[in-house]
Amino acid sequence: MLALKLFLWPGVRWYLRRRVNRVIEEVNTRLQIEIRPFQLTRKQALVDQLLFDDKVVAAIKDYALEHQIPKEMVQAKVLRYANEIIPSFNAYLYFRFGYWLSKSIARLLYRVRVGFFDDDGLKKIPAGSSVVFVMNHRSNMDYILVSFLVAEKTALSYAVGEWARIWPLQSLLKSMGAFFVRRNSGNPLYRKVLERYIHLATRAGVCQAVFLEGGLTRDGKLREPKQGFLDYMLRDYHSDIDPDVVFVPVGINYDRVVEDVSLTRKLDPAASKRSRWFVLKTTLKFAFKMLLMSRRKRWLRFGYASVNFGRPLSMRQYSEREKIEFSQLDQSSRFDQVGKLSHRLMKEIANVVPVLPVALMSQLVLEHQSKWLSALELKTLALTRIEQLLSKGAPIKLAANASEGILSVALTMLLGRGFIESRDNLMRANPDALNLLRYYANSIAQWDD
């Protein structure tokens, strides 16, 4: 045993560290945004940095006085919070395993499409800036899809909720750079620890991904933006001396969202809560069916998954233009300004959410739900609608010579899932599937007059 400790384990650690360093050197030569030293710092060092942060120390004193408990007990709480929040980023796992896994899953289920509205703007983001991808949240597949698509540009750090705090998923996600958040915690001490971690990561230039809506949409519409994360990033931001914070709007959409039935089911207040066993059984059954399906059938069933990256918004330029210094504002004024910024970013996200065939056909079927229409009539209506959307600047990419076939596939998907019913070569909305049709139609509702 002594020999193992003295000779074997140091050799194993040296070998693994060498492999990790080799990966870091390799990926940093091709990444637009390099892996930051903060991400490579040992977790214990980050925990200590957070534990002895001036504002966290002040929060510990206030909490101890308010609750009349020893300061050491409060420090123990903070230590637990810090260990829970802070990730243990592993570049080897992220780029060797995570990238392969996310690419495999995304391409297994979907035809993936990506668009850049200002790729030059992304390339021109100054080195050292903290880049934050702000996006809508339609599915838990968003984590996988966006991580895969930006893996050639940077390593993302996500905030994940309580759903991921199960073994071994928790350890895997932390090694991939994710940090855990108690979404509805009203504990001021916990919120202060979370705030200071986000502040430290932002100041260090860590590239982050934030779902501005705070949670999954249940009716398909874009939700009102949450201000919490933006406020944490900007409340101590000094535009003249701090590294620039650059927000990049990201719009995500799917021809089929894996969780669509469970999400729309939550709209019914009378619906009973599913047990964990039911969820596990359904998930395993779904995964087994996917493995048995041919690649052609998978494509017909799931269609497109599309991501658009919008124009970057520099906080340094924004602060100068709006004559705002977030660090100098009182709480009320800061919340007002952060709210204004969040709504602007939400509008930018809405403008780049892809218009996909299933959403388009769902919208038309709902508009004419009292009529029986032929496939030709629906596709003609769709082509007309496409022209209208393009004139408004909607992000829709359908080649003229392929649009007829793509729209036919969308109708086939809706028929196959029972969203529309057919009789004598005519089709109309299935009355039992109106919520699901609305869910998909609502993903492009921002372009309605």
Image (cartoon, rainbow, N blue to C red):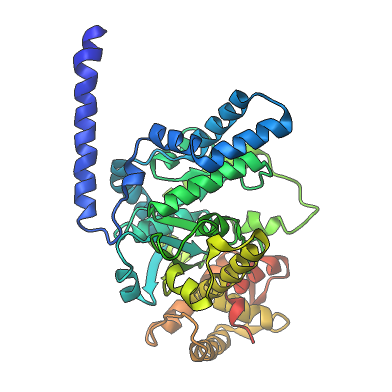
Relative image position of residue 165 (x, y in whole percent): 54, 37
Q: Is residue 108 above or below residue 125?
A: above
Image x and y of residue 204, in percent:
38, 51
Q: Using the image, determine if residue 86 lies above or below residue 312.
A: above
Q: Nearer the viewer, residue 125 or 358?
A: 125
Q: Quadrant of residue 48?
A: top left
Q: Is residue 440 left or right of residue 307?
A: right
Residue drawn at x 20%, y 17% is: 8
- Residue drawn 48% across and 55% down? 141
Of residues 78 and 427, the one nearer the viewer is 78
Along the line of sight, which residue is nearer the eye, 287 or 203?
203
Q: Is residue 307 left or right of residue 140?
A: left
Residue occupying the point 30% across, 71% down: 124
Would you say residue 151 is visible in this rendering?
yes
Task: Describe residue 107's horizontal placement relative to residue 71 as left or right.
Answer: left
Quarter of the view holding residue 296: bottom left
Q: Could you tell whether 18 is left or right of 114 in the image?
A: left
131 shown above or below 42:
below
In this view, the residue farthest toward the right is 270
Q: Where does residue 169 sit, x and y in percent of width and height?
A: 47, 38
Tell me how many marks there are. Answer: 0
Residue at position x 73%, y 82% from top?
Answer: 370
In the rendered image, residue 278, in percent from the top left (x then y), is placed at 64, 40
Quadrant the N terminus occupies:
top left
